[in-house]
Amino acid sequence: MGKGGNPGRGSVPKSSASKQDVNVAERLQKMEKIPPAHVLPPNCPWQIALTIRTREAIGWVLTINFLVFWAIPIAGNGLLWKHCLRHVIRPLFYVIDSRFSPVRWVASRYLYKNPRHGDYAATAFLVTLSAFASLSMVFWYQLTYGTLSWSVIAAYYWLWVGIGGRQMGGAYTFAHKEGHNAYLYQPWFKKTIGNWFENYLGVFYGNVPWNFTTSHISIHHKLQGGMGDTFYQWDIDRTSWRDFMLFIYRIMTHVVGFSSLYFFKKNEQHRAYNLLRQGMLWYWLVVPSCLYAITGSFSFIFFIYLQPAVAMMYFLAFINIGLHAYIDFDENGRHISVVNSSAVRIRMMMKMMMMMMMMYHVMMMTDCLF
């Protein structure tokens, strides 16, 4: 929550947080080493106003896009799971995930380096299987009929989210785990395929390859959400929908990869820079070119490949502004990392956030209309 000044619009709040931010900025050596989505142009009123309005407009476009294409699949899958399917699907999953399951047995011995990571096997297998099935459906339809119907796109989005959000959540979770654990897989798998979810399947879930290995580890965790973090939000007034629009813009630059790449370049972190640049070239150039060569359709690329990334731009902003809600300092004004890195329990937060989302957007629309 911003305190004083003009929170969320490039000013520095007049609090102990601002002193700490200045200290972090000094450690980064120069202010220009902070991603440009976090700062505004020099003291030029019209330029500042134009920048703010542009970023707000982008935030609104991403919000409307989310409401049109993704709100119903996400909310619908959640309600379907909670009120209907969990009592049917859970027992079936426990059979697949049991100690005697062949999936767990094979993964524990031949896929994961640590046998205890066999706990991931059933979910990872089902996420991969579901992704292949849904992608096969849309590719078959496109190649057969030359275009995608709205019903096919809607069905794909429903499957992309998964019952209870388990498909999108699983793909993101495993990409996150691969980024954190460089020794997750057996050497044969690590050398031949590597981070399957982060660098391959993840491209269909809005994830730029190497994003977790580089940005998430070397920026987000290293800075504990402080200035320079691509998820920086301590200058955001959480009671202001305009500030939230600016935060969505900030997360957009993260999802694209630009803000992280900028940070690595300015801070001379060459290995991370090269890895992420390779991932961005793969995500924004190589894969779309291959998809167009196969389908000959820009609309296919937009709805099947790019829309998930656009969805994550809003969804990550919405989740993170509530998930990372805490900041505290010791008596010397230094960050207390165990507080700054604390997160709201995800199940509790998701219930609250889904209710808030409906109320939040109703209030925003009311403000605009009346």
Image (cartoon, rainbow, N blue to C red):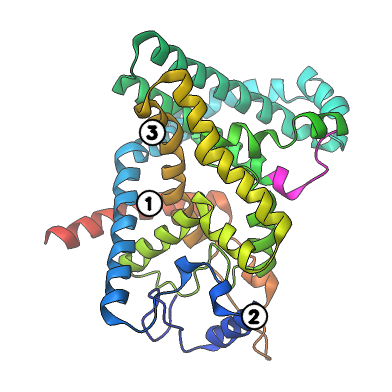
Residue at 47% in and 70% down: 38
Image x and y of residue 112, in percent: 82, 33
Q: Categorize mark 2 by other alpha carbons within 10 Å: few (<14), some (14-19), many (20+).
A: few
Query: In the rendered view, does 231 fall on the left or right side of 148?
Result: right
Q: Which residue is mark 2?
A: 29
- Magenta span: 177-186
Residue at 46% in and 83% down: 12
> Of callouts 3 and 2, which one flags the residue occurring earlier in the amino acid sequence?
2
Instruction: For residue 211, say whether it is visible.
Output: no
Q: Categorize mark 3 by other alpha carbons within 10 Å: few (<14), some (14-19), many (20+).
A: some
Label 1: which secondary element: helix
Image quarter of residue 44: bottom left
Image x and y of residue 313, in percent: 44, 50
Image x and y of residue 347, in percent: 55, 48
Residue 302 is marked as: 3
Image quarter of residue 245: bottom left
Label 2: which secondary element: loop
Q: Categorize mark 1 by other alpha carbons within 10 Å: few (<14), some (14-19), many (20+).
A: few
Instruction: For residue 242, say whether it is visible.
Output: yes
As measured in the structure, the alpha-carbon distance from the residue carrying label 3 to the one carrying label 1 is 30 Å
> Of callouts 2 and 1, which one flags the residue occurring earlier in the amino acid sequence?
2
Label 3: which secondary element: helix
